[in-house]
Amino acid sequence: MQVFDNVNLFNPADSSWELSSFSVEDGKVALIGPSGSIPGKTAQISEANG
């Protein structure tokens, strides 16, 4: 599993950018909040190198 911390993600709901963390495991992206995964949020990752 790869974890990416402090990544600026675009929030289309209010057209803002928010600093978030996310993990990638088996090709699946999960956003990580203060208390684990944030339900109902998705991230579009066009390219992740690492």
Image (cartoon, rainbow, N blue to C red):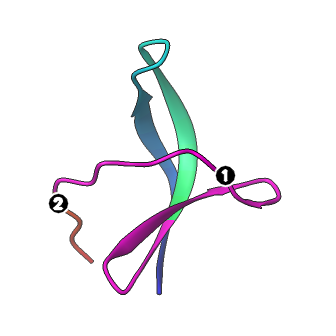
> Gap between marks 1 and 2, in whole Å?
22 Å
Question: In the displayed structure, would residue 16 be above or below residue 3?
Answer: above
Neighbours of disc 1 within 10 Å: few (<14), some (14-19), many (20+):
few
Q: Residue at x 17, y 60 (%)?
A: 47
Indicate whether residue 7 is drawn in magenta: no
Q: Residue at x 38, y 73 (%)?
A: 28
Secondary structure beneath disc 2? loop
Q: Is residue 35 left or right of residue 39?
A: right
- Quarter of the image with the C terminus is bottom left
Q: Is residue 15 left or right of residue 30?
A: left
Q: Position of residue 1 (x, y in %)?
A: 47, 87
> In the rendered image, which residue does mark 2 sit on?
47
Q: Which mark is residue 38?
A: 1
Secondary structure beneath disc 1? loop
Q: Which residues are magenta?
A: 23-46
Q: Earlier in the sequence, mark 1 or mark 2?
A: 1
Q: Position of residue 18 (x, y in %)?
A: 53, 31
The amino acid beneath tag 1 is: Ile
The amino acid beneath tag 2 is: Glu
Q: Is residue 12 left or right of residue 50?
A: right
Q: Position of residue 27 (x, y in %)?
A: 31, 79
